[in-house]
Image: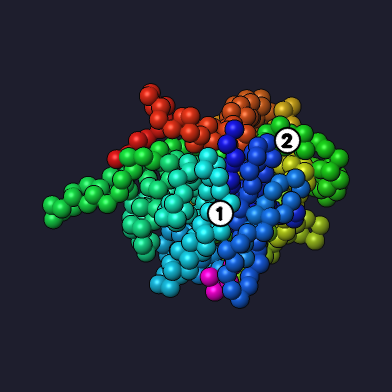
Amino acid sequence: MSRLIVVSNRTPGKTVAAGGLAVALRKTLSEREGFWFGWSGKLTDSPSVQARFEDVEGLSVATIDLTRDDHQAYYAGFSNSILWPSFHLRLDLAHIDSTWYEGYRRVNQQFAQALLPLLKPDDVIWVHDYHLIPLASELRSLGATNRMGFYLHIPFPTADALYAIPHHLDLMRDVSRYDLVGMQANRDVAAFTEAVENMTHTNLAGDPLQLFDFARTEVAAFPIGSDPGAFSRMSVSSAASKMVKRMERVLAGQQLILGVDRLDYSKGLPQRVEAYEKLLENNNDLRRRVHMLQIAPPSRDTIKEYQETSDALDAICGRVMGRFADPDWAPITYVKRAYGQATLAGFYRMARVGLVTPLRDGMNLVAHEFISSQNPADPGVLVLSRFAGAAEIFEDAILVNPFDTDETAAALRLALVMPLEERKARWRTLMAAAEKHNVDDWSKGFLHRLSPVVAAPSQPARDIIYLG
Ligand code: ADQ
């Protein structure tokens, strides 16, 4: 079997990771030959193009250092102040600095220069996420002919939002240099297809805009998932039960509403707490009988919009406390730290309601993890945003529009009073979907499609979209 080279901005470390990527891919790479390549996390005065290898808990990991200026332009700048907000349809939060694109390209070139000497001709390269869209172009311009796949961990934007991104034509050309492009959900494949059709269509002046050749690129949805068996086991492990026991004492029979997220404006956190505030406002009978726990460790906190989201969340949690707390009852606990997976699984299992309400999201792995951690005899209810990719597979969640806090408040009430039989019936369907879309099959499915043997299928699979 050919080697697998996984490439992402950050490589897995030994600390607790708040992102979904490390959790998902560690397992895949531990099962075959190859290595993980990315940024070391170190900033230096001059760029390095010679990778250092190290063993990280059995994984072979190769890293390079970046200069401080390049990293700023590539990561906080182009990736997270332009691509992230635009791909999540938050053009109001995008900042455009024309120098960032050069830094973004420079880092992708540096990745390519450092990776090329490490490659064998039949290595399969799997590139992850929006930080590295140009990597295939850069590798190919240095002569690499390997099979290359790209997986996008965030939603693909609508055509209008795409056009708002500086150099979007270059980026789309870069996408066309991959053999396989994986998206989170069908919604994203549809948005991508529409953008490509617009761009290759005849424009109003009559000139055909034949800018891209996607004839050799397959684009399909590969919905990512979790490891349901592992979460199910962890939820009753001794590592989970320590925290669960402490929480049970504090809750003393109150029903738990749980949110677990990175602190990010895409996750709809202030809106979520506002919905909870409305629940308490409209339902006197629920006060002192429910408690909301929101876990949200800071991420990208050097970026102004993330600090503002953090401030907004502080303010609204304070408001809810001020309006409803008694000396012997707190309506909400807000914790700004990350927990290990087993502890999270314990929290998920305790919760009567898992509240997953991003304003726009890729799949969202927390929804998967919540479902997988439930007690089949007394499961909780998932309240899920329509705008998470997970809404395409979890039809038996209570689906809400997260911008409509009245609707979310009503959904919360429905979840809290839902009879046991209905909770069990819904959970069985949700768990079947979580098992069907497990992370193992996700990575195997992507790599199977990317492997040279299936490069030119005579009968294309039904969900592949051939463009061009
Ligand atoms: P994220 O934006 O990071 O992922 P999500 O899918 O919810 O969002 O994954 C979060 C991961 O981090 C989960 O595994 C969760 O357990 C973990 N996590 C969250 N809060 C934590 C905490 N307080 N302590 C410890 N761990 C925590 C991006 C996209 C998603 C996409 C994934 C995978 O935004 O839409 O599904 O990548 O492709």
Residue 188: mark: none
Q: Nearer the viewer, residue 377 or 185?
A: 185
Tag 1: residue type? Pro
Q: Is residue 68 magenta?
A: yes
Tag 2: residue type? Ala
The residue to which callout 2 is attached is 230
Outermost residue to the left: 206
Q: CA distance from mark 1 to mark 2?
A: 37 Å
Give residue 154's position: percent from left, percent from top. 50, 49
Q: If you read the primary sequence from the N terminus, does the residue marked by circle 1 or circle 2 appear first?
A: 1
Residue found at x 41% / y 62%: 91
Q: Quadrant of the C terminus?
A: top left
Q: Main secondary structure of the magenta part?
A: helix
Q: Nearer the viewer, residue 86 or 277?
A: 86
Image height of 167 relative to 145, above or below: below
Q: Disc 1 or disc 2, which is closer to the eye?
A: 1
Image height of 460 relative to 167, above or below: above
The residue to which callout 1 is attached is 117
Q: Which residues are magenta?
A: 66-70
Question: Does residue 237 appear in the picture of this structure?
Answer: yes
Residue found at x 41% / y 55%: 141
**Quadrant of the rendered structure where residue 354 is?**
top right
Give residue 86's position: percent from left, percent from top. 43, 58
Give residue 455's position: percent from left, percent from top. 43, 32
Residue at disc 2, CB closer than 8 Å to ligand 1:
no
Give residue 377's position: percent from left, percent from top. 74, 27
**Quadrant of the rendered structure where residue 319 is?**
bottom right
Query: Mark 2: which secondary structure?
Result: helix
